Image (tube, grey):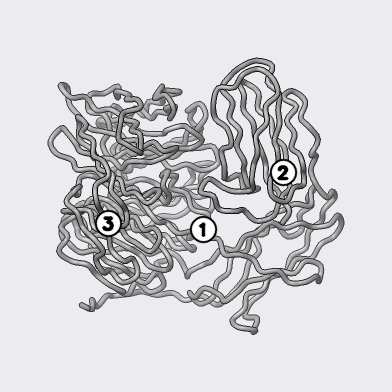
Amino acid sequence: MLILSLLITIVLSDPGVMITEPVDGETYNVGWLTIRAIVENENEIPENVEYTLNGETAIDIPRLSTDWYTYMQNDLHHGFSESPAPQNNTIFWTAPITGTVHEFPTPVVVDGLVYYPQNVNGDTLFALDAATGDVEWIFTGIGSTDDAVTVKDGKLYTASDSIYCLDALTGARIWATGAGNWKGSTPVVVNNRVFCGCAEDYYSTIFCLDSSTGSVIWEKELPGTTVSCMTCWNNTLFVPTHGYTAIPGKLYALDADDGSIKWEEEASSCSGYWDSSPTIVDGVIYIGDMDSYMRGIDAYSGETIWEYYLSGGPYYDYISATPAYASGSIYVGTDFHCLVSLSSDIGTLNWEVDETIHGSPAIADGMVFFGEYYLTTGSISVIALNCSSGATIWTYQTTANRLRGSPSITDGILYIPVEDGNLYAFGTGLKYTYRDDLYAQAGANELIVTSFEGEIAVAADTINFTVTGTGISLEPTLRLCLCASPNPFHSSASISFELSEPGWTCVTVYDLSGRMIRTLENSELGVGQQSIVWDGRIENGEVVSAGLYLCRIQSGEISETIGLCLLR
């Protein structure tokens, strides 16, 4: 294996544990809480982390994976990480593996490895150690690529001169096929299938491949060029295309099983979509058009729900960035004008800052991160803003002429490619997140979280908090008679409600962090009593842990929520 010598800057931190939830000294009116701790262990995952509450038996806390396994973090392109994030511009390490022209791919981080494919100036895919930046393996001769790789189930998929499938740990080639090219964006890997595009001048071919063999399952030719990344949700593949007057750009919804068109939405500008990719949240697509409009689109029908015009800059303000989503807001920027925060439900403006962005933003720890693209402020910088206000938290000025890449955030480190020849890692050390549900009795409580190496405790944190009540109301709601039985439950609960008029009804389950984990119903329902069963599993069939969950129903203008208590 070829060994590459890198110039590395490393800042090590002392081992430590910090409990972030519950909050020290806080009073809670319910006993069901979330326990969340950040553990630093000299850039190594601790052997185990456990908590004790009021001196009772110690309980292990599972590590929360914050891997950034594809473009914009996950299959739905939320661009959001539950990881802690750098609070200042301290550089953890740098690795000289990028070029100086159009370094656009997002670093992908999985299981302690950082994957980065060179763009214009090279044909090499790198796998680096996340803690040091040292090269673990390289794969050469694949040609340039314009987008991030996808890593799932120990395999890496990348689109360059072909679609490649590699062993993510070693870089060994498993298969390769010509069913795609570097213009066709990041491969989408869902349900043992790989979706990719082969883009030519004003037409494209979309392929569905078997993820194990690379064999073609189906292919579909579409007018327009697939420059953006595709998104798969609800067994539907969403494909944005770029066009011109005779062949306008459109957003296509394809059946993931056979490639047939479910619906198509023509962009308001004939150019359509360039680099801005679909971000999907609760059945709504968020995407930016070349005409400077940011839109919320119904994923079921293709109908526009709202649109917002990003105007006012000195140049044509096309949107090439993919919007990031967190806590009811989306964040997106234009190439030559501004970065905005919009409410995701109706598209109203939260705030706007005079920054320019070509690559997409990333969100973590209450901050939005991005690379400044156009020289309007006299610097090309990595920037961190407060999500709530848009206020600047920190910046890092680079020596590059452009910064077009998108960042990723995993285990407390921000990774971003810069067109000065370097991949940057910002932070002070790897910080691992541990999270679980916690039930505390009414009264004063003492919580201790300890990290271990073998049987040796290496770090601990202690907090105290007060609980004034032991639960939440599990009584039926008033307007929809929403209730669950049994509740608490061990394996499944029947969720019932009553509709006074027919209408589109959505029933979803959330964990206590507000993350949607399961859609139980999303369809037109008739008048009368309704009943749906939740089996304690998330969308992919994985069983959830014991704890408190929230069931939300939305029918017409009525929205109600009830608690579900799962016992194991």
Q: Position of residue 138 (x, y in %)?
A: 24, 70
Q: Viewed as shown, does residue 41 lie left or right of 308?
A: right
Q: Disc 2, disc 3: CB below 8 Å?
A: no
Asked if residue 409 is positioned above or below residue 378 in the image, the reply reads below
Q: Indicate which label's residue lies in the foreground, 2 or 3.
A: 3
Earlier-in-chain disc, 3 versus 1:
1
Q: Which mark is residue 270?
A: none
Among the 4 quarters of the image, the one containing residue 376: top left
Earlier-in-chain disc, 2 versus 1:
1
Q: Position of residue 238 (x, y in %)?
A: 35, 35
Amino acid tagged 1: Ser
Q: Which mark is residue 83?
A: 1
Q: Residue at point 58% right, 69% down? A: 39
Q: Residue at point 67% right, 41% down? A: 550
User: Foreground residue, 504 or 32?
Assistant: 504
Residue furthest to the left in view is: 201
Looking at the rendered structure, the secondary structure element under dot 3 is loop
Q: Residue at point 42% right, 51% down? A: 73
What is the C-alpha distance between the residues marked 2 and 3?
42 Å
Looking at the rendered structure, the secondary structure element under dot 2 is strand
Q: Which residue is mark 3?
A: 213
Amino acid tagged 2: Leu
What is the C-alpha distance between the residues marked 2 and 1?
26 Å
Q: Residues within 10 Å of mark 1 (few under 14, many from 20)?
A: many
Q: Which residue is mark 2?
A: 564
Among the 4 quarters of the image, the one containing residue 69: bottom left
Q: Can residue 22 be seen in this snapshot? A: yes
Q: Residues within 10 Å of mark 2 (few under 14, many from 20)?
A: many
Q: Position of residue 144 (x, y in %)?
A: 17, 55
Q: Can residue 403 be seen in this snapshot? A: no
Asked if residue 224 is positioned above or below residue 37 in the image, the reply reads above
Q: Indicate which label's residue lies in the foreground, 2 or 1.
A: 2
